[in-house]
Image (tube, rainbow, N blue to C red):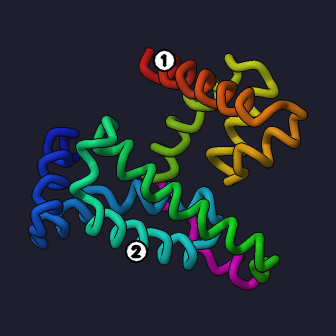
Amino acid sequence: MATLEEIEELIAQVAEGDRAAFQRLYALTSGKLFGVALRILGSRAEAEEALQDSFVKIWRNAERYRATGFSPMTWLITVARNTAIDRLRARRARNEHLSEAEEMASPQPGPEAQAIASGERAQLLACLEELEIDRAEAVKGAYLMGYSYQELAETYGVPLNTMRTWLRRSLLKLKECLTR
């Protein structure tokens, strides 16, 4: 497992066009980023395509990393998440639905991955329970289901800026809870 400093250094090298650093960055982070895309898209094939698109964006935009102020994994996860959400929205716009055969063909994660995910999931669920119910549901809608802020504002009957505030404050509370 690489440290955040190593990942940050790899991103800096990728920004300079270092292909070996890009390969190492992919090897170290692709599993996590694939998991993010798979959770959002629910389709292994689409998640693989989203992962590929994400790494193309990372290659092209690595020099922008420093300007974001995010930790390196947060930046990488944000790229993957946004790419997956863009695909999800495009799918919704086309009204495409996965066939049962595609859903059944998706293999389950292995026991180790399930154990890790189970622990992380339990911690996240416990932290979500600390939020007000509508705030927790809005966070799930935005970051797991790919709904836009506007869609959520309409669903909850609040102004768009109120929804943005809900989500920002909820994420800060979640961050605080997850670091305890």
Residue located at (29% from left, 61% from top): 61
Name the residue nearer the viewer: 163 or 138: 163
The boundaries of the magenta stretch are 100-111
The crowd level at tag 1 (other Cα within 10 Å; few <14, some 14-19, many 20+) is few
Is 173 rendered above or below residue 2? above
139 relative position to 119: left or right: right
Q: Earlier in the sequence, mark 1 or mark 2?
A: 2
Q: Give yes or no for residue 109 being in the magenta stretch.
A: yes
129 relative position to 120: left or right: right
Identify the image quadrant of residue 20: bottom left
Residue 3 spot, x, y in % from top left: 19, 40
The label on residue 52 is 2
Residue 71 spot, x, y in % from top left: 30, 37
Is 173 rendered above or below residue 113? above
Label 1 sits on a secondary structure element that is: helix
Q: Quadrant of the C terminus?
A: top left
Name the residue nearer the viewer: 47 or 146: 146
Residue type for callout 1: Glu
Q: Please name the residue that numbered disc 1 is placed on.
A: 176
Residue located at (81% from left, 27% from top): 134
Residue 41 spot, x, y in % from top left: 63, 65
Residue located at (25% from left, 58% from top): 62
Identify the image quadrant of residue 161: top right
Instruction: Report if the CB atoms under discs 1 and 2 are less than 8 Å apart.
Output: no
Residue type for callout 2: Gln
